[in-house]
Image: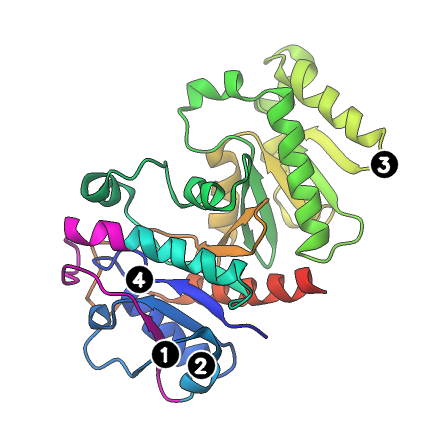
């Protein structure tokens, strides 16, 4: 198994401490290595500097394997240093290069601060996902949030709620379903994926009484896929899609906007949610939380989501290769 490349993320956030905690808990059974500045790790962290990913498995027996990447500034918990922004970006690019060269099995990214990157390095992308798509040379990727009991995909993501009806086109929904279906087969190993499609409006529009998006946009796309043999259910009322009996009927749910997807998964399993980018030519996961500047450096950050992200990266990488 190729080791997982873990990017350091924003050094002033909780990334360094949860990386160290993750090694303590799973480093002996799941090979991964951190790309970043060793001096940014919590004081006293057992670490082993490596020169190539192939050294990670042996190094992990004695400390957190670190592929050194020098940063200009120190890591001050809660206070991003603008001098570090360029290196945060370069670490992501370096991880992608390693996985595309076949030297790492997948990319797992620790949280970044988009504001810090924009102010310190003029970062021109809305976030990790868009930058990774740029590095991979793909025009469309999809964000999935996954935990053991639920997988959700928001068709529209970080836009105002008022703009969702305009952005929710037949083309967007078609591409989202295609990419999700392919990933469920290729990466999750589901031979015949079952996908539930949420409506946009309350009660899925109630036959047009509460909106016509279901009739004019969503249902025609669903019917087109059904005619090709896809197993799709919907459009469904979102308020009855996520109880246990409903979840048992599908492998993933495609929702129409950000909170419609993220509220149920964060309610069901806040600590173990994993962000998976679908549509890339490599596996990418990340913990489903941010930099948490307010608790950085206090030793209280929970590594559970990062551990889940590393474990899922390894599992998806194995499935895609086979």
Task: Looking at this view, name the residue that lies furthest to the bottom.
Answer: 62
Residue underneath mark 3: 229
- The residues bearing labels 1 and 4 have C-alpha atoms spaced at a distance of 19 Å
Q: In terms of depth relative to the viewer, which is nearer, 71 or 243? A: 71
- The residues bearing labels 2 and 4 have C-alpha atoms spaced at a distance of 22 Å
- The residues bearing labels 2 and 3 have C-alpha atoms spaced at a distance of 46 Å
Q: Is residue 37 magenta?
A: no
281 sits left or right of 28 in the view: right
Q: Are marks 1 and 2 in contact (CB under 8 Å)?
A: yes
- The residues bearing labels 1 and 3 have C-alpha atoms spaced at a distance of 49 Å
Q: How many residues crowd around disc 3 within 10 Å: few (fewer than 14), some, or many (20 or more)?
A: few
Q: How many residues crowd around disc 2 within 10 Å: few (fewer than 14), some, or many (20 or more)?
A: some
Residue 247 appears in the picture as rendered: no
308 sits left or right of 8 in the view: right
Residue underneath mark 2: 55
Quadrant in which the N terminus appears: bottom right
What segment carries the magenta color? 62-87
Residue underneath mark 1: 50
Q: Residue at x 34, y 54 (%)?
A: 111
Secondary element at image label 2: helix
Residue underneath mark 4: 15
Residue 50 appears in the picture as rendered: yes
């Amino acid at each position: 198994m190729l080791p997982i490349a873990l990017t350091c993320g924003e050094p002033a956030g909780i990334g360094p401490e949860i990386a160290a905690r993750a090694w303590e808990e799973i480093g002996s059974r799941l090979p991964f290595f951190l790309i970043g500045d060793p001096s940014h790790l919590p004081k006293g962290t057992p670490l082993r500097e490596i020169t190539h990913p192939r050294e990670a498995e042996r190094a992990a027996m004695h400390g957190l394997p670190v592929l050194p990447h020098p940063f200009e500034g120190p890591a001050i918990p809660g206070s991003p240093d603008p001098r570090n922004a360029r290196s945060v970006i370069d670490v992501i690019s370096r991880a992608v290069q390693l996985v595309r060269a076949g030297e790492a099995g997948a990319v797992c990214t620790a949280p970044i601060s988009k504001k810090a990157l924009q102010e310190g390095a003029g970062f021109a992308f809305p976030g990790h996902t868009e930058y990774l798509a740029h590095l991979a040379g793909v025009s469309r990727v999809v964000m999935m949030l996954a935990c053991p009991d639920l997988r959700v995909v928001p068709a529209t993501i970080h836009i105002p709620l008022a703009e969702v009806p305009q952005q929710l086109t037949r083309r967007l929904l078609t591409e989202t379903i295609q990419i999700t279906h392919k990933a469920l087969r290729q990466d999750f190993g589901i031979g015949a994926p079952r996908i539930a499609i949420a409506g946009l409006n309350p009660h899925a529009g109630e036959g047009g009484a509460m909106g016509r998006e279901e009739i004019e946009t969503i249902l025609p796309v669903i019917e087109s896929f059904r005619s090709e043999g896809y197993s799709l259910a919907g459009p469904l009322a979102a308020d009855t899609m996520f109880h246990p009996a409903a979840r048992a009927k599908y492998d993933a749910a495609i929702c129409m906007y950000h909170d419609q997807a993220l509220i149920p998964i964060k309610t069901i399993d806040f600590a173990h949610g994993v962000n998976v980018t679908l549509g890339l030519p490599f596996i990418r996961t990340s913990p489903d939380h941010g930099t948490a500047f307010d608790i950085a450096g206090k030793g209280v950050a929970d590594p559970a989501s990062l551990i889940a992200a590393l474990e899922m990266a390894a599992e998806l990488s194995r499935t895609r290769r086979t």
